Amino acid sequence: MPDSDAEKTWDAEIMRRLSEIDSGTAKLVDRKEFRRRMRARMNRS
């Protein structure tokens, strides 16, 4: 059975993250750095 609160929870999380980006408090990484981090995580598994 799907979590009935999942959609609301994700909507709230998305809004929280967008707010952090708009206010300048989010730590953003560029695509190259993101790919490097993801590859590093995949290699650990």
Image (cartoon, helix red, strand yellow):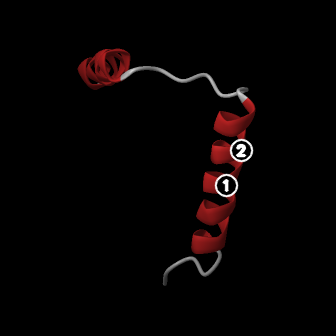
Q: Residue at x 36, y 15 (%)?
A: 33
Task: State the image coordinates of residue 40 (x, y, percent, origin top left).
Answer: 31, 15
Q: Identify the amino acid type marked 1.
A: Met
Judge left or right: residue 30 versus residue 6: left
Along the viewing direction, whichever of 22 and 27 lies nearer the viewer = 22
Judge left or right: residue 35 versus residue 8: left
Q: Residue at x 30, y 17 (%)?
A: 32
Q: Which residue is mark 1?
A: 15
Seen in the picture, residue 12 relative to 20 is either above or below; the reply is below
Which disc is residue 19 wearing? 2
Q: How many marks?
A: 2
Task: State the image coordinates of residue 17 (x, y, percent, origin top left).
Answer: 64, 44
Task: State the image coordinates of residue 19 (x, y, percent, origin top left).
Answer: 71, 44
Element under disc 2: helix
Task: Tell me the quarter of the image containing the C terminus.
Answer: top left
Q: Identify the amino acid type marked 2.
A: Ser
Seen in the picture, residue 13 relative to 37 is either above or below; the reply is below
Element under disc 1: helix
Q: Residues within 10 Å of mark 1 (few under 14, many from 20)?
A: few
Mark 2 touches mark 1? (CB < 8 Å)? yes
Task: State the image coordinates of residue 7 (x, y, percent, origin top left).
Answer: 58, 72
Judge left or right: residue 27 versus residue 37: right
Give the quarter of the image for residue 39: top left
Q: Residues within 10 Å of mark 2 (few under 14, many from 20)?
A: few
Q: Residue at x 70, y 27 (%)?
A: 24
Give the quarter of the image for residue 12: bottom right
Along the viewing direction, whichever of 34 and 21 lies nearer the viewer = 21
Which disc is residue 31 wearing? none
Q: Residue at x 68, y 38 (%)?
A: 22
- The span from disc 2 to disc 1 (Cα, nearest Å) is 6 Å
The residue positioned farthest toward the front in the image shown: 22
